[in-house]
Amino acid sequence: MVVDGMNSMVGAGLFIRRKTRVIMVIVICCATLNVGLNIVLIPRLGILGSAIATLVAYSGVVIAMGIASRQLLAVPLPWGTLLRSSAAAAVMYFALERVLPGHGLVTVAVRIALGVVIYGLAMVAIDQDARVLARKALARIRRPPPQVTPS
């Protein structure tokens, strides 16, 4: 989802200039790549092969749109922030990987709750902007509510 969500950012020039034919060619080529990779990977890796094929195809769309769009409208990406948030996501994944395996909805609920905390702490540890936001949030929580004076 994250990779797919990048399409609108890196492909902004294509969308703004309404280059739908270019977008269509990119999507069709990457969909064909996805089908081909599925044919090769599913027999060997099962559902994991399908996931890998989809990730590769979606990444191909992002890269192709970024290259095609850059000529129309250059959109600078915050690569440092993307790398730091990816690192925090990896920390969260490995921390939650073995939490309550096989307990259905309970697992989902516990992993979501713990994931929010772990990801937030990881971001605060490695990202200056996250520390600033955390300080602001804590200041709001600690601030006493305004006193209402009777008239």
Image (cartoon, rainbow, N blue to C red):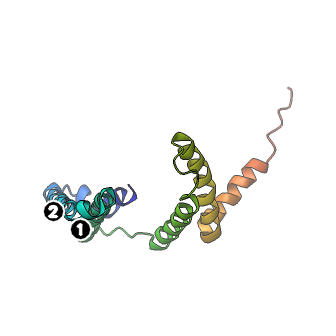
Specify the quadrant of the image occupied by residue 18.
bottom left
Q: Residue at x 62, y 59 (%)?
A: 118
Seen in the image, is 84 located left or right of residue 55?
right
Residue 149: x %, y % from top left: 86, 31
Residue 34: x %, y % from top left: 21, 60
Secondary structure of residue under mark 2 = helix
- Residue 150 seen in the figure: yes
Residue position marked by numbered label 2 in the rendering: 29
Q: CA distance from mark 1 to mark 2?
A: 10 Å
Amino acid residing under circle 1: Ala
Label 1 or label 2, whichever comes before in sequence order: 2
Amino acid residing under circle 2: Cys
Specify the quadrant of the image occupied by residue 40.
bottom left
Residue position marked by numbered label 1 in the rendering: 64
- The quadrant of the rendering that contains the N terminus is bottom left
Verify CB contact (< 8 Å) between mark 1 and mark 2: yes
